[in-house]
Amino acid sequence: MRVKRTVMVPDWAEQLASDATDMWRAPTSLPQRAPRRVEFEFPEDAYFEYGFIDAQGKIRADPANPVRADNPWYPDASALTGPAYAPDPLATPDRSFERGRLSRLRLTSDALEGQLRRVAVYTPHGHDGAELPLVVVQDGVAFQRLAGLHVVGEALARTGEARAARFAFVEPVDRRAEYGFSDAYLDFLLEELPPALERVGPSTGRHVWLGASLGGLVSAGAALRRPEMTAAVVTLSGAFLGEPVHREFYATRDSWLLARLADPATRLPPRWYLEVGTIEWLTDVNRRAASALRSRGVATGYVERHAGHNWTNWRNGMAAALRFALEP
């Protein structure tokens, strides 16, 4: 069943941005005659973010809607939910589980021409010095501080739903340049970072690469370059459109990943978990990627949620992703 929501347009609003427009990338015009209003329609279990763009080009919240989106990229967006929407129980994890050790690394990268890189490494409670799976996380600041991915991992390990793991949260500097087909950034992830992480605590030698959006793309790139050191890949709304020679991630149907998956010479990791929203431009390419992975014999988890390209969607998928990637 689908539901409709009517929203009144503020006097100052000039355009509408929402999950349906990928926010500011393709905003839509608004009615000029009174009464100014827009109507949204979405599935009954949907989570939906939107905002109005003012004359200065800033996305602002709906003043008539007290519910704000919990989104670090669009902090002033508003949110709507269908009557059947229910967040995952671990989308906002209990921070009392956060009893492990956080180590902060500062690395000077030769691959990135002397750039200083910051990585926060979380070792779960009671596992100092233990050999553990290592989850390497892109957009590390958001996944650590906002989402609490490592706390989800602690909670699942306590109930036996996932193996205990060490989490390396890699802080981006220029995420579009780094995550969008950068060989130098992959050199940093695959050659320079692992020895530094081993000094914090030993790993099993095969990693989980995890990321959202373009972070999913670079996680896929790491896994395909070094499948022998990959235990699993987790991509949430993976931005799988575009190619190294044509870095257009939106207005294209070309896909480097789909081309690689179709090539029988491409070596693949053993496990891959994908999630995507049905209210975003990446739904089709993720469906095709999941199908291609299954056809190649990769153990594949695939989930679609009635949501857009936003952090609430990805937080709702964290627990399921870790259950798959860190299966006991």
Image (spheres, rainbow, N blue to C red):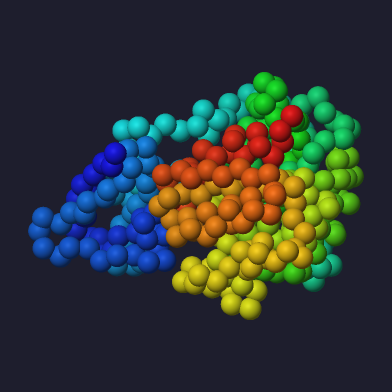
Q: Residue at x 53, y 34 (%)?
A: 91
Horizontal side of residue 49 vs 3, given as left or right: right
| Residue 133 position within the rendered picture, expressed as x and y whole percent measured from the top left | 79, 39
Regarding residue 269, the answer to whether it shows in the image is yes
Seen in the picture, residue 39 relative to 321 is either above or below; the reply is: below
Which residue occupies the extreme top position in the image? 159
Q: Residue at x 64, y 50 (%)?
A: 294
Q: Pick whichever, 292 or 198, lies toward us.
A: 292
Horizontal side of residue 188 vs 96, given as left or right: right
Q: Residue at x 81, y 68 (%)?
A: 111
| Residue 35 position within the rendered picture, expressed as x and y whole percent measured from the top left | 11, 55
| Quadrant of res 266 | bottom right
| Residue 12 position within the rendered picture, expressed as x and y whole percent measured from the top left | 23, 60
Quadrant in which the C terminus appears: top right
Q: Residue at x 15, y 57 (%)?
A: 36
| Quadrant of res 155 | top right
